[in-house]
Image (cartoon, rainbow, N blue to C red):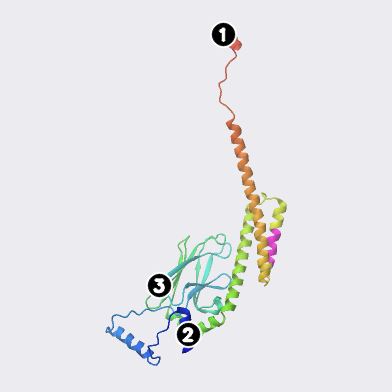
Amino acid sequence: MPAVQEKVKEITGKEPHRGINPDEVVAIGAAIQAGVLAGEVKDVLLLDVTPLSLGIETKGGVFTKLIERNTTIPTRKGETFTTADDNQNSVEIKVYQGEREIAAYNKLIGNFQLVGIPPAPRGVPQIEVAFDIDANGIVNVGAKDLGTGKEQRITITASGGLSDAEIQQMMRDAESHAEEDKRRKEEADVRNNADNLVYSVERSLKDVDGKVDPNTKLEIEQAIKDAKEALAGGDIEEIKTKQEALVTASHKLSEALYSQVQDQQAATSDATDADDLVEDAEVVEDEDDQQDGERR
């Protein structure tokens, strides 16, 4: 097909090989495979690859890929995640297969829970999620709390049960919705970043309560409130605006804290300098007093 050949040339920058008859290529491939299985062909290396990307759903419904499509198997890939809420004692791991940026648009092929996470502020627990695909295409997914060592695993076989036709359809869907998915992922990222900033500034303000100027505190509290209200709505540009305002307000908090630290250091330095001016000396009696003492 001329269009396909032109596309191959555009992507690779090389002229495509046209020496194979398209009507014969399938039969040739089958014959080579038969020869490999029979042990008659020994100089051909056949590699199995993952037909679609594999990953999990993360905050905001985003599909986070751990194993990319066309990765040679066997393979293993792990990544560390954390909790989304304070005192969260469990996490649900939803395993998806597909190419869409939003998890719900891909195929859910398994899910499980990791429980028994010790109470902690969000962002503190470290949860390692690992994908392990063996030579037979069997997928083992594990989640481990690095703090306690607790672990949970799931085994998935047959690539989620998708036929070749379904895989091709999922690829076409991903391509046709690429722009829409990109926009939705960017929106999710904006929301996640703003939410994380609100949480971080709130904690910082609580930690230094009573140590900042009341006017500065009121300004930061108002910026936090505005950001929360924006997050409750659906206007992404409004969220960005309120996030920027909160960043500016949080800088004032940092400036106030560093100013206090510098003042404390200066006061400590002055006290040290004053101590250095004091000289050690012996008390010497007056000569007259010494004589009086001898007469007594």
Provide the residue span drawn in magenta. Answer: 221-229
Three-letter amino acid code of the residue under disc 2: Glu
Three-letter amino acid code of the residue under disc 3: Thr
The reply, left or right, for residue 259 in relation to residue 120 is right
* Residue 51 falls in image quadrant: bottom left
Q: Label 1: which residue?
A: 294
Image location of residue 194, percent across then percent down: 63, 65
| Residues packed near mark 1 inside 10 Å, few (<14), some (14 to 19) or many (20 plus) | few
Q: Are marks 3 and 1 in contact (CB under 8 Å)?
A: no
Q: Label 2: which residue?
A: 6
Image location of residue 218, percent across then percent down: 71, 56
The rendered magenta stretch, by its main secondary structure, is classed as helix
Image location of residue 106, percent across then percent down: 53, 79
The reply, left or right, for residue 187 in relation to residue 75 is right
Question: Upstream in the sequence, badge 3 or badge 1?
Answer: 3
Of circles 3 and 2, the one toward us is 2
Three-letter amino acid code of the residue under disc 1: Glu
Label 3 residue SS: strand
The reply, left or right, for residue 137 in relation to residue 255 is left
State the mark number for residue 79.
Answer: none
Q: Can residue 77 be seen?
A: yes
Q: Can residue 163 be seen?
A: no
57, above or below 296, in the image: below
| Residues packed near mark 2 inside 10 Å, few (<14), some (14 to 19) or many (20 plus) | some
131, above or below 200, in the image: below
Q: Label 3: which residue?
A: 75
164, above or below 296, in the image: below
